[in-house]
Amino acid sequence: MSVISAQQIKKTYNPKTIPVHALRGVDLNIEKREFTAIVGPSGSGKTTLLNIIGGLDRPSDGRIEVGGKDISTLSDNQLIDFRKKYIGFVFQAYNLIPVFTAKENIEFVMLLQKRSKAERDARVEELLSAVGMTEKIDKRPSELSGGQQQRVAVARALASKPTFILADEPTANLDSKSTSDLLDIMANLNQEEEVTFVFSTHDQRVIDRARRVITLDDGVIISDVNID
Amino acid sequence: MLVKLAWRNIWRNKRRTLLTISAVAFAVFFSSFMNSFQKGAWDHMMNSVVNSYFGFGQVHKAGYFEEQTLNNAFDPTEAKSQLGNIPEIRDAVARVESFALASYDKYTSVAFVIGTEPGKEDKMTELSTKVSSGAYLVDSEKAILIGSKIAEKLNINVNDTLVLLGQGYRGVNAAGKFVVKGLLTFPSPELNKTMIYMPLQTAHDFYGSEGMVTTLALDIDNKEEAIVALANLKQNLDTSTYEVLNWEEMLPELQQAREVDTGGAQVMLFVLYLIIAFVLLGTILMLTKERMHEFGILTAIGMDKKKLASTVWMEILILGFVGSMVGILLSACIVYYFYTNPLDLSIMGEDAVKTYESFGVEPIFPAAFQWDIFFTQAMIVAILTSILSMYPIIKIFKLNTIAAMRD
């Protein structure tokens, strides 16, 4: 069964004034452990699609199922709960909580899930080790470089053991070395944690590492290529 | 961790936080300070009048308070017998009160003449401690104590003889010569200008009011006991024959003046809190605007809106709480100092003393040191901050995650 299944997803902004059709009917299935990049020019609908998959936005039409559950009908609170349980987010601007240390940023997500202290501590240690940030455990985001912050963001996204991770332009603000390191980390976690990764990206370095590349243009999928 | 998040968020912008805390602390400090002084000064004034003369309650013949003449005197035997049943009433001082002309040499003045039981009077109002020169009265002697200001006006001193002329019980002439045994100095300048005390029996002889009294002044410990005692007494005494008055009923002008003064201060405090509310609102508006993006991220990663709202509410409440505590600590220290060392405005010179005396007020202002004053102000701040925190809370509940993340 697909982890994500989208059928005829449409999204129109300002439908009553000046309608902007961001998605014009997208059909998409993403399986477990995929490492997928959604690419396309600016305004093609990548971020909109990612937001709808992630339960941050609702489609104007169509049906979106995550783990077999239709999320397009969930209420705001149900969507928050859904995101907490099933999805990890990695943002272009890292978006770590500035007043928390690396450890606390990761732990916070688990705290929202009411995990025990021992469980949280063990998972933080495991994830910081996986992203190579053990030594920066007590550093706040302002004391970390962009690449380091993004690694912590990946660890945070994985903390709740989500079904999949949505990464919106995760490497856009990183240099080549940081990008390469981050992609290595995510590829390893994809294998080891068996978590599905879906990227929206312009970055050729990400596209090169993806095992499936979906190209969007003007709100429709124009190609869907499996590299494997 | 939510508390940690709230606490650290508060200190993200140290300057703004310190400014907000200072504003709250100032409001609490100023209002506590002002309330303590106002309450202290009024309590002092009330107590000096109540303890110096009135007592917390009095029994008269019905109608006496409206028409204070000797003809409204009564036989206290029955009323006294009822007092013994009320434990809060320790004793009652029988008094005969009337006005007379006081004359010495070429000077004459109106005086308020009180015949009293010297021993009981001293126990209740500590009258002997007000004797600034000479000696206190002994039962039945034909001597008087006279207020220091009236003595000054009449140019009379201890051991001189004062002539009193007036109207006695049921229209008899009252005239007599009395040796001044002592001068009295009360905290209230008004009392110093009018009061003349003599033993009760001497007053009966002077006014021809044998066996009658105008007042039974009740010796009760405090205001709270007075409420219970007087309520009891009213039930036990025939109120068509007697009137039972509490100190507030006997001093309506003072009570009204206090209410007017307190009301004025409340208006001032309202304006002060309004200003502080705007300072807090400014902080809250900035805090909310700056953090919309973060609120979006937090809800995106699964923090439910209730938790987020309660964290922000906690932040604002902590700001108010810390500000209140600083304000309480500051004001408590200063108020305590003035509670133990009352502000004595006589150091400002004779003119200041005279100004206050013209209002019948002693120029001494102690502060009241009562925790409820401080905590009332803290509660006001807590309520204020809770109301103001509705703004970010409403914003959070209406939050659109995507729009907030784009902010």
Image (cartoon, helix red, strand yellow):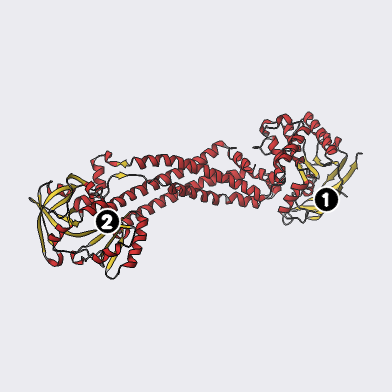
Residue B107 picture location, percent across and down: 10, 51
Indicate the amino acid at tag 1.
Gly
Gap between marks 1 and 2 measured at Cα? 85 Å
Residue B198 vs A204, above or below: the answer is below
Q: Locate residue B364: give its quadrant.
A: top left
Graded by Cα atoms within 10 Å as few (under 14), some (14 to 19) or many (20 or more), the crowding at tag 1 reads: some
Residue at 64 percent across and 43 percent down: it is: B2
Residue at 82 percent across and 47 percent down: it is: A218
> Which secondary structure lies at badge 1?
loop
Which one is in front, B134 or B343?
Answer: B134
Residue at the spot of label 1: A67
Q: Mark 1 lies on which chain?
A: A
Q: Mark 2 lies on which chain?
A: B
Residue at the spot of label 2: B54
Residue at 67 percent across and 39 percent down: it is: A97
Graded by Cα atoms within 10 Å as few (under 14), some (14 to 19) or many (20 or more), the crowding at tag 2 reads: many
Q: Nearer the viewer, mark 1 or mark 2?
A: 2
Q: Locate residue B201: give its quadrant.
A: bottom left
Extreme left residue here? B105
Which one is in front, B402 or B189?
Answer: B189
Indicate the amino acid at tag 2.
Phe
Residue B188 picture location, percent across and down: 25, 49
> Which secondary structure lies at badge 2?
helix
Extreme bottom residue here? B240
Residue B1 picture location, percent across and down: 65, 42
How many numbered badges does the structure rendering display? 2
Task: Kindly tell me whether residue B227 is visible in this rendering.
Answer: yes
> Is B344 placed left or right of B195 in the picture?
right
> Is B394 placed left or right of B62 in the picture?
right
Which one is in front, B360 or B82?
Answer: B82
Task: Kindly tell me whether residue A95 is visible in this rendering.
Answer: no
Residue B230 vs B149, above or below: the answer is below
